[in-house]
Image (tube, grey):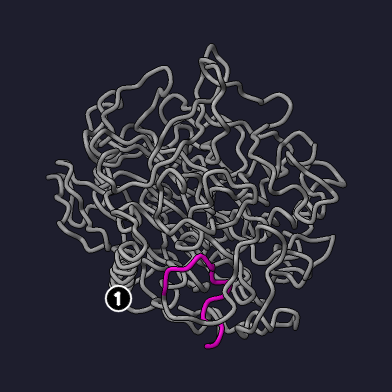
Amino acid sequence: MQRAPFAIIENLILTAAVAGLSVATWGIGSIALAQQPAPFAITKVAPNELNPAGGGPAQATLQQAAEFAWEEFFALSWPAGPNPTARDTPSASCAFGDQSQNCGGPLVWQTFRGKVEIFPGDGNPPPGYSSTDPSFGYDAPPQYTYGAIHRPVICQNPTPLPPTAWVNLDETDQISVDSMYAGVVSVPPSPLNSAPQLIRFVAKANRAEYVYIAKHGWWGDKAPNKAPTAATAAYVKQNMRDPPDGNNYVLLPPNGDTTLPGNSIEVKAGWRVLNPSEMSSGRFHTTTVRYYEKENGQTCYQQATFGLVSLHIIQKTPLAPYFIYASFEQADNILDANGNPVEDADGNVALAPPCRSDQKSPCPTTPSVTLNDTATVNAPSYVPPQVVLDPSTAAYCTSSTSTPPPNQLFYLNTSGLAGLPTGGYICVNTRDNAIPQVIIDTNNKAHNLIRTYSGQNGVQNSVWQYYKLINVQYQPIDKDHAGLYGPPNPGEDNPSTYYLANIVVETNRPLQLFSGSLVGGGATGSNSDYDSQFGGQQAPSIIHRNVMYQGKGYNMGGCMGCHAAQGQAAGGDFSVIVARGTVGIAETPAPPTSVGAAVVPRNRSLK
């Protein structure tokens, strides 16, 4: 297993930031960026590099990466104030964790632009765009237009109309391969929420990424307003590295252009309805969200209070052009069949999941599933691998899809994707790879910081002590064989880090244990490590590399590997939002569909 070599910084403009020297922030409303290495602490200043004084991410420890991730979380989860006029800006008067009336507006990351606010899908500039503004209108209030023909009206139109929610949940599945549900939600379906157990998602990007796209005018699907993703993808494939900055390629900041406002940051968050006991527990961050339903055959939107259950933060830094990937969850996501937490707030496993009589231990899901890959890859036809029930006669978690599990998380694979079992619900018992001890210890340290800080600043029972870091990917690692990465160990190269996966964002078998790529251009939900599965003429035994960095390919797993396969390989510089932003099909907001079906055009979907 080979790690990424320490990057040599070729652009001297970046060296001041890399060395931790004073670097001015850019523009009104920019996220404050750290200028000096500092002790682990709660601050509204987000770190802009991992281990800058010690060789960068390639020389960092997992503990350093975990503290970096938490410091991102602190800064980006800071209250932005009740009525922010500048996005990406922490409130000057609100403390971290304060959600009282005067501080109860959006968080900093919630003011980032949603993907449809960057790529509106109708060939027109993004809403609020201004060529005379240094931020190109980034700070305009949120608007979700979805092109000229996909502009939903509010369901059951009230008077007066509610203010536009900052959180726009326009995704209802996990990149189209499965839909995720929370059994603990006991609210019955209604016309205003036909699928209350469904976990819905939002994806956003910060000022730096938006300004880069808007500066180039790359918001449409036709020249001159189409991002040069094809040329970028071809360059990456041929040279096994990112292209140079310029008008002919996509290279997100930091890229040496000093007129841009800093590092590109994206977030993806999962939200759901809370049951009454959860709403009163003080353990969930809640806010008003916009989500989508069908009314008289037309897509419409509704707004309601949802709870945050997951948060991905990815940041491209000068020494991590492949982005650093950090994933957080609410403490109580994984429950057993009786509703008891499987993990504590730090991530320790509190109880071992029971195995059904037709399962062998360990049993992360019921029924168990496995990837059947090596038995088919050497066939003359190179039949794509299959995800199958283990054993093949295993029964699904419940007797039918009309009987959902009462407490556990469960998912339904998307029908029509060959290679995935789609006959019923699959319950989640635990993670495929447990959270490493170093992450658990850092979570405990962060929670103690939160409690101390809250007491000093008058914040009562901060909800953030009930959120935990799952893991961080901060450098590419090459898995040079098919099959699972392992064996488990407590060091840096552990399977949990390699397969970074959030239990409510990357839930099914291909996403929990992702490496190589997803097979078949959308025809299958399975993944494979073999290059021959992706249309190449290579020998079946050639391993597929997804991350291209400094002239070398890496068969990386988890979030980084997926963003490489779906983002870098498609010319979006590891951003799936950018890679898919101008695909020629106006995005449609996603209402719930018939079970297991994903039918709407999406910016972020399997390809």
Residue 148, relative to residue 250: is it above or below? Answer: above
How far from the left and from the top, in percent, is residue 343?
Answer: 23, 57
Give 15 or 334, whichever is nearer the viewer.
15
162 versus 28 height, above or below: above
Q: Is residue 138 magenta?
A: no
| Magenta residues, start to end | 41-54
Q: What residue is disc 1 on?
A: 489
* Figure quadrant of the C terminus: top right
Whether residue 516 is visible, yes or no, is: no
* Image quarter hosting the N terminus: bottom left
The answer to which image quadrant residue 154 occupies is top right
Residue 256 place in picture, x, y as percent: 76, 73
Return the residue nearer the eye: 106 or 512.
106
The single residue placed furthest to the top in the displayed view is 296
Residue at 54 percent of width and 59 percent of height: 92
Q: Is residue 342 left or right of residue 67?
A: left
Residue 564: name its quadrant. bottom right
Residue at 55 percent of width and 40 percent of height: 166
- The residue shown at (42%, 47%) is 386
Q: Residue at x 82, y 49 (%)?
A: 217
* Residue 42 among magenta residues: yes
Residue 371 versus residue 406: which sits nearer the camera?
406
Q: What element carries label 1?
A: loop
Residue found farthest to the bottom: 54
In the image, taking residue 36 as reference, residue 509 lies left or right, namely left
